[in-house]
Image (cartoon, rainbow, N blue to C red):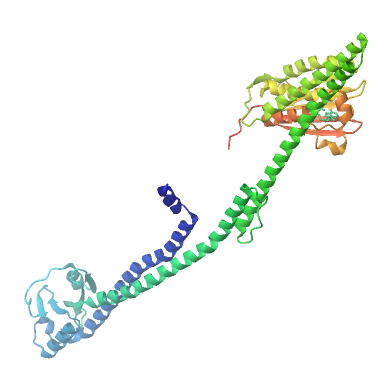
Amino acid sequence: MKNRISLSFFRSIWFRTVFLIICVGIIPFLVCVPISLGAYERVSIHTDATNLMAQVISYNNQIVTSGYVTGEENDILDTELKAIAESYNGRILIINSSLKIIRDSFSADIGKTVIWENIIYSMQGESLYYFDKLTNYLIVSVPLTNSEGDIVGVLVINKSMDYLDQNKDVFNSYLMIGAVVILSMTIIIAVLSQIRFSRPMKNLEKSLDAIIRESESVLPEEKSFVELESISSKFNEVIGKLHSIDESRQEFVSNVSHELKTPLTSMKVLADSLNGSEDVPIEMYKEFMLDIGEEIDRETKIINDLLSLVRMDKSGAVLNISAVNINELIEHILKRLKPIAEKSDIEVVYESFRPVVAEVDEVKFTLVVTNLVENAIKYNNEGGWVHISLNSDHQYFYIKVEDNGLGIPEDSVEHIFERFYRADKSHSREIGGTGLGLAITKSSIAMHNGEIKVHSKLGEGSTFDVRIPLNYIEKEVQ
Ligand code: ADP
């Protein structure tokens, strides 16, 4: 448990933001310090080398014309060069064209031959420098030329660069103080900003707790940050949706109870009136029993429709998909429904533009066509007509069910797919409608990733357009 708490601390926004702010404050510092110290060292070496070269060049004429480079004695030059070498805490060597040391401010290596690539390059006219990190010495080699421009020797001058380390130590100590100041400032800024940022989050958490405990029903408006403001308003939307789902569930339950109770009440009234009267003639018994039978049929239809709806509503409801010949299926359904249409002298015409085979759940798709055609017959006039057509393109197949019947009032059109909704309540009940048919139809079409649209005019008729993909593509579960 303790371990989990400590791990969740590292995963908290609090820890991560503080860590990030500290990194942002300190990393540039850690990167810049070595880079600037390196740059300082390079610039100092280059400046010192250039100065040394200029100094040697100023002595060139004196050294060459006096014959000092060929071994002639010159006390003044001796003293001057020694003084220069001492001032740099270094050494001066003069090497002749045979690479022999002619002069040495230490007087230690006179007569020795030196073979070093910088000296060889300088013999060819180049002025060079090299910094020896091990000894901390800067070594500069400059060619000595006579008045004709010929190279007669090379002057090598060493300079101790110990002052660089001393300067770097001073820099480092200043930088350390700077680092401590920056680190403390970033920590203070990070902690303070986190306290400021986490307060509205804590408030949001408290408000959500209040909603869970049901002491509040909406989140208070959050005015701290735009992001939190948008999260709170989204939460309120979700809460609103949950409320409306709950309300529609309650409404559905009360509708179901009401619909199931109505036939039972009728049966009770019929049975009571038979039980309450004496010497009831057998004809009346038969008539009442017929009515009771009708009410039982009605109750059965409501229950069957409810079961179909529940089966489709169940999340994860499975479709039994297979390749179905839609033309044959429609013809089969119409064969079953035509006798009902004939009773009211309604003409049913089916027109198929091409053969269609589609991947559908045969049982659930049958409900779609049956409900639409049944409604077109039910809500029609004596002698009316119902036209059904089937067409397809490369992606979808289309079914149109058109009638010249009663039509739907304009303000009812948007509600007809709701459960238990009936545009004309008394007529619908009279003809045995449950108000669930179109809700079942819509669910089934949605399960097939299809669409349904309706156009209707009261007194003129209705047209239902259905579009379903030919190939069923299972939706990914999120
Ligand atoms: P019901 O079982 O009452 O027919 P439905 O869900 O199938 O329920 O239809 C809902 C309502 O839509 C019906 O009560 C009816 O008023 C209206 N309706 C559906 N189809 C048609 C149609 N073809 N013509 C006129 N009204 C229709």
List x then y, in percent, for residue 92: 15, 80
Question: In which quadrant of the rendered view does residue 90 lie?
Answer: bottom left
Note whether 5 is above or below 44 in the view shown: above
List x then y, in percent, for residue 273: 89, 19
Which image quarter holds the C terminus?
Answer: top right
Does residue 5 show up?
A: yes
- Relative to 410, 396 lies left or right: left
Of residue 397 and residue 386, the one placed in the foreground of this image is: 386
- Relative to 45, 183 lies left or right: right
- Relative to 172, 203 lies left or right: right
- Relative to 432, 230 lies left or right: left
**Residue located at (73% from left, 38% from top):** 248
Question: In which quadrant of the rendered view does residue 89 lie?
Answer: bottom left
What count of labels does the image hold?
0
**Residue located at (37% from left, 70% from top):** 180
Note whether 269 is above or below 101 in the view shown: above
Note whether 300 is above or below 196 in the view shown: above
Of residue 170 and residue 70, the one placed in the foreground of this image is: 170
Image-quarter location of ligand 1: top right
**Residue located at (63% from left, 23% from top):** 321
Q: In the displayed image of the protein, which residue is found farthest to the bottom? A: 76
List x then y, in percent, for residue 111: 6, 76
Of residue 329 and residue 174, the one placed in the foreground of this image is: 174
